[in-house]
Image (cartoon, rainbow, N blue to C red):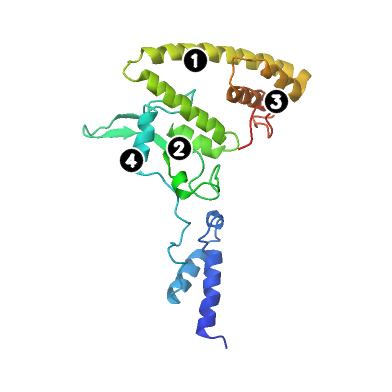
Amino acid sequence: MISKSRFSSVCESVFQVVVPVQPPFCNLPTPPGVRRRALGLASQLRVSPPSGQSRGCMPRDDFSKALREAVAKRAGHLCSRPDCRAQTVGPHSDPTKATTVGIAAHLTAAAPGGPRYDVSLTRAERRGIENALWLCATHAREVDADFARFTVQELRAWKAEAEREAGLDLGHGSAPRAARLSADLAKASQRDQRISRLKRLYPVIGAQGLALEISTFNDLSQTEKAKLFDTVRALWKGGRPPKQNPFRTPA
């Protein structure tokens, strides 16, 4: 007959399998009822997760409230995505409050298994302002949902540009921003024309020829060339971005 201590040890092992406490298993689904029965059994036997941990995942390296406020202010409370720049703060129905629809997103994930997670970072670096990017709620979700497309390098470029523009606007009203918006519209029109032409050429020149064509656009940054390549390829691949991009360095 098995002893109570041995039975408890076995149950603890079972508990850690069906009620995972370590990533990446904590994100896996548990069959209905199994988790509840395991928790009940563990409670009866006084079995607990490893010291310092709860019955959920390991703690996330989330940003502090002060850091979230700082990264929002450094972006001028505007979404850092270049083609968005949506205002993320405004009045609340309560005259003593404000409504915020912005999010301090992680460039590299706050926990293992998350988007763009970088195991080489310390917890302090993961929680630091260099790892934070201010985005509107829509684009914060998008960059994490399609993390293969939105690389750390591209997001860092967004952050640098957003902070640069916020610095230019500081104390100058809306005129500089309006001028930039006008320039952005002209640039967007030119980009649409290029996409239309490259889409027509693609069946003839293929991916290699497409890359050569885009490489001649000296007015575009490396990130802009990568996005243009993705866009044209996706138009011929049912909307799916390519797995390889000659203008994008792997994260």
Q: Which image quadrant for residue 145?
A: top right
Alpha carbon of mark 1 to alpha carbon of mark 3: how far?
A: 26 Å
Measure how far apart labels 3 and 4 are at the Cα level.
45 Å
What's the distance in space between the residues labelled 3 and 2, CA to CA? 37 Å
Label 3, residues with CA under 10 Å away: few <14, some 14-19, many ≥20: few
User: Height in image: 43 above or below 74?
Assistant: below
Mark seen at residue 66: 4
Horizontally, residue 232 falls left or right of residue 106, namely right
The amino acid type of the residue labelled 2 equals Glu
> Closer to us: mark 2 or mark 1?
2
Residue 134, image x, y percentages = 42, 33
Amino acid type for the residue under numbered disc 3: Trp
Secondary structure beneath dot 2 equals: helix
Q: Which type of secondary structure does the marked residue at label 3 adopt?
A: loop
Residue shown at 51%/46% (left/top)? 121
Q: Classify residue 171 as left or right of residue 194.
A: left
Residue mark closest to the camera, 3 vs 4: 4
User: Cβ–Cβ below 8 Å for labels 3 and 2?
Assistant: no
Compared to residue 229, the image places residue 9 above or below, namely: below
Extreme-left residue of the structure: 96
Numbered disc 4: secondary structure: helix
The image position of residue 174, as x and y in percent, is 35, 15
Amino acid beneath label 1: Asp
